[in-house]
Image (tube, grey):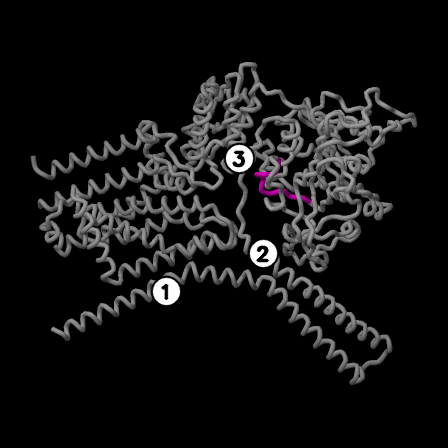
Amino acid sequence: MNKQLLSKTGLILAVILFIAFIIVVNGNFKSARVDLTEDKLYTLSEGTLNILSSLQQPITLRFYYSEQVAQALPSLKAYAQRVQELLMEYQRASGGMIQVKIINPKPFSDHEQRAKQYGLQSIPIEGEADPLFFGVAGTNILDGLESIRFFQPEMEDVLEYDLTRLIYQLSDVERKNVAVMSSLPIDGEDYDPLKGQLDTEGGAKPWAVMGKLREMFNVSVLPEDIRRIPSSVDLLMVVHPKELPDQTLYAIDQYVLQGGKLITFVDPYAEIDVPEKDPDNPMAAMVANRSSNMPELLSNWGVERNPSDVVADRKTARQVDFGAQSNNQPIEYVLWNALTQENMNSDQRITSKLRKINVATAGHFKILDDATTEITPLLSSSDEAMLVDKRVVQFRNDPVALLTKYERGTISYPLAVRIEGQARTAFPDGAQGDNRTIIKMPDHLDEAKSGIDVIAIADVDLLDDRFWVIMQDFYGEDLAFNTSNNIDFIHNAIEELTGAEGLISVRARTGFTRPFVRVEALQREAERLYRAKERELENKLQQTRQRIARMQVERSGAGAEIMTPEQQKEIAEFRAIADRTELELRAVKGNLRKDIDQLETLVKFINIGLIPIVVAILALITGWLRVRKRTRGRFQS
Amino acid sequence: MNMLNIWFIMKREFGGYFATPVAYVFIIIFLLLAGFSTFYVGNFFARGEADLYPFFSLHPWLYILLIPAISMRLWAEERKSGSIELLMTLPVSVFEAVLGKFFAAWAFTGLALILNFPLWITVNYLGNPDNGVIFTGFVGSFLMAGGFLAIGSCVSASTKNQVVAFVLSLIVSLIFVLAGYGIVLDFFSSWAPQPLVDAISSFSFLTHFDAISKGVIDLRDILYFAALIAIWLFANALIVNARKAD
């Protein structure tokens, strides 16, 4: 046999072997991998493993995935593989309690029909005749059904959380009863929870937070004039209590003393509480009360929410574009804060693993000297925060002025606290009812039975959709993309207070962006340096222009055709001042980005030019050495 | 197979790269292109995210252009100048020579890749990146470079003309990057059975590189690149052997 023939046969054999090898490898070795991400994003978390090991009844997960249709979408295919493998990981870790079925629903088949019955979403793909199914339906033996209608690749960060939540919902854990009381339309207007839709067209929708709460708990809404909190309520959420009647406060007081758990959101200035506009009296909206508090109860529990101050914090300020007010450029709005891990209590399970919580014009708590309870801050401002009178925001909100007048403080203010321990009632004699009668409950308590457990948060706006979620329409369904951990904070707090094992440790894994902190710091510093100057110059420019205008008006008023040389000189001087100021102002505006631009240029130079230059110099040196060696060698020989 | 022989050839080849200015020019071009594409195509600074996604995501396309330029001379040059005869008279086997040359080229590419280290420092200076993800990004990129080099090395052995070697390697590399994309798969799915189509899609460099650069080193991705390198180097050795017999 000649050598060439041998090599050809060898090559063909090798190619076949290679293809077979890749197919075999892809089919096996599924869990042989090392997850090197900092947060172990691709490994089942401890919380998930705990939930899986405590499953009492079998759960079937049907993974519907139209494989052929997905061929046209390579990135989605890779994600589908990840989902499938994660599901297998769940099956493996569940010790037989979870069974995963992978189903490829062919068009017009029973499987397709079933997928639709489970509520899964099919998506039309361009250039493909059949729609794409890519979701999971989970069932338990009690006919419970939960599904993820479609796996969004953009939500890969929260994939494990979503799957674990689905399993948790199907497991036989008893759902806690959460009651919500609010002066704001938190559950939408005329929203019918049974139908899951609005009764009237055009009414306000429920806030996204309600949908998220309903995923995990049995949620009911209580009226604000209630006389007694039902004992079946495991946790009460009081949102923006504005002028609650005494009977309600008394009901809350007794509920808490009886051992009921409470989370309350009390805000000095709730941005979301937008007053109705009165065309006859435009001032009415401005002076409308937008604050909420429960001073009677809170003071008895050992804290006080200052009624007039909001917390301004430069260190955690968010960049906000106020349009013309901020020269159409985003500036640091010191009243809107993105709290980071530094601002959260790392010893409390509720906050220990969260990364970012957005608050807006938040208030703060003062711990009273005579408090009988133990008060633990959960969220705090940085120690550079300052307090601002809320009227500053209410009557003339000027973000630039806020920034220029900002003075770094030295105190860290608690924005959310947990209150535990002994407390007495605020209504020892009962409370006054609607018809001026005194109500005193038959089982009235003067003192807590076994200590109270309350979380008070000095901000309502953190529940507002725009501070934590982006809603997107996905084939008629609202999809929520979290932009911060606000909802996780609420979920964690409820689970912690009600003693539900829950998903706290799984939730902590949701990852967010990793910004260029140094660039942000530079921006902060630049703003600090230049905003005040900018404002001063702008004022000066305006005054000068006004003076010129005034002089011209005076001249025409005097009827003089020609100005005196003195007047001409004066106007010329003012013009010169105006020109100079304008030039200065432009320089100051330029300076705002100067440091960042310089850093960008430097970074670009180092990363594009520096090493090539070093390599070129090295090449020249070695080349020269070589030439020298050669010539010397020649000379010596 | 004698490891010492492979090491000897590798050292000789690696040193050979720096005997001419070509290696320096290649490194400079690679660094410039990687830098420019990261900052101007990937918008690294404007993105404001402390990760190296804009850097790594463009590597497959950079390699398609640059690696054939390294690999084209691996064997074509030897064959053209006749130095292959000299190489074959040395007491080394064809496999050892193939491996030695390949490892030298791979180490050279690795050096070029490592010289992008200022970017890693930069991103750590500007923010708090996930360094695990960055590390796997480098590992994935290096493995992918190995895949491209193995293809190029084999193609180079089959021709005396470096330009032909360059163009052919570029085309084959492109196929391996694009496998997994709709166009390629449609062509196969019209006549090939589904498992084969699946296998072809799993042959794409992009699929495996993306998986590694997300921060997870999966045995399957490592085995894929290892097997790919092995098969192309095996073919490379067969071709050199066959040509030797000519």
The residue lying toward the viewer, choosing from A543 and B4, is B4
What kind of element bears circle 3? helix
Q: Which residue is mark 3?
A: A158
Which residues fall within the magenta stretch? A350-359
Label ID, residue A27 = none
Q: Secondary structure at mark 1?
A: helix
> Was residue B221 drawn as part of the magenta stretch in this picture?
no
Q: Do pointers 2 and 3 mark residues of a single chain?
A: yes
> Which label belongs to residue A521?
2
Outermost residue toward the top in this view: A142
Q: Which quadrant of the figure contains the C terminus of chain A?
A: bottom left
Q: Chain of mark 2?
A: A
Q: Amino acid at mark 3?
A: Val
Picture residue at 47% right of the left edge, 24% below the top: A63
Q: Examine the residues drawn in magenta and state their main secondary structure.
A: loop
Q: Nearer the viewer, residue B92 or B83?
A: B92
- Name which quarter of the figure residue A247 lies in: top right
Query: What residue sits right under mark 1 in the picture?
Result: A613
Residues at badges 3 and 1 in contact (C-beta under 8 Å)? no
Q: Secondary structure at mark 2?
A: helix
Chain of the residue displaying label 3:
A
Residue for point 54% across, 45% down: A513
Query: Which comes sooner in the sequence, label 2 or label 1?
Result: 2
